[in-house]
Amino acid sequence: MDTLSYKTKSENKDSVERKWYVIDAEGEVVGRLCTRIATVLRGKHKPSYTPHFDAGDYVIVINADKVRFTGAKWDQKEYITYSGHPGGQKRTVAKNMMAKKPYAIIENAVKGMLPKNKLGRAMIKKLFVYAGDEHPHHAQKPEDFKF
């Protein structure tokens, strides 16, 4: 019998190589953009994807204030926060959220697409969203991400 061993390689902290990517969000639809971002943060775009390990890359999103929604979502989509106190629930429409915190629209969407556990909380820390077209991460030599 042949003794070839075809072992599946599993990523670990010694073997993972993380890259930095820049994504320009200008004119992009929020949901479609954020699914791609979540895929990169999880590491599913790599052939060495390991579900139980955070092997994803870092993502820098610029021009978050120039994203778009389809349909009537600017007036109908609501973001709900709750302080934990009675009467502490607040609702913000997407149009008002864009005026106050344009980066929060992308952060909320991506966070909802990641696992709801310790692994997901580690993945969201690799996301950096900026409203303008400038970012302070030039020292990491980020590459443009091709969709």
Image: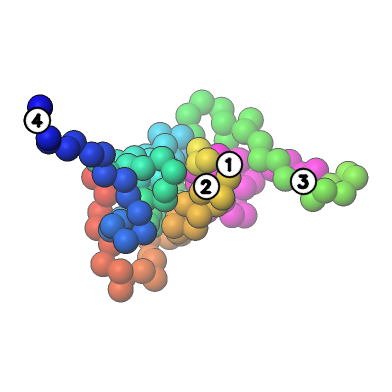
For marks 3 and 1 on the same chain, the one whose residue lies earlier in the sequence:
3
| Overall secondary structure of the magenta section | helix
Give left or right: position of 78 versus 8: right
- Name the residue beneath numbered marker 1: 116
Query: Percent position (x, y) of residue 138?
Result: 31, 70
For marks 4 and 1 on the same chain, the one whose residue lies earlier in the sequence:
4
Q: CA distance from mark 2 to mark 3?
A: 21 Å
Q: CA distance from mark 4 to mark 1?
A: 44 Å
| Tag 3 and tag 1, C-beta contact below 8 Å | no
Q: CA distance from mark 2 to mark 4?
A: 41 Å
Along the line of sight, which residue is nearer the eye, 67 or 17?
17
Q: CA distance from mark 2 to mark 1?
A: 6 Å
Q: Residue at x 72, y 45 (%)?
A: 81
- Name the residue beneath numbered marker 2: 120
Query: Percent position (x, y) of residue 92?
Result: 69, 43
- Name the residue beneath numbered marker 3: 82
For marks 4 and 3 on the same chain, the one whose residue lies earlier in the sequence:
4
- Name the residue beneath numbered marker 4: 2
| Tag 2 and tag 1, C-beta contact below 8 Å | yes
Q: Nearer the viewer, mark 4 or mark 1?
A: 4
Vertical position of residue 31 compared to residue 97: above or below: above
Along the line of sight, which residue is nearer the eye, 120 or 97?
120
Callout 3: helix, strand or loop? strand
Q: Residue at x 10, y 27 (%)?
A: 1
User: Is residue 129 at all visible to an observer of this figure?
Assistant: no
Q: Nearer the viewer, mark 4 or mark 3?
A: 4
Give left or right: position of 58 versus 46: right
Q: Residue at x 44, y 57 (%)?
A: 126
The crowding category of the residue bearing disc 3, from other C-alpha atoms within 10 Å (few below 14, some 14 to 19, many at least 20), is few
Q: Quadrant of the C terminus?
A: top left
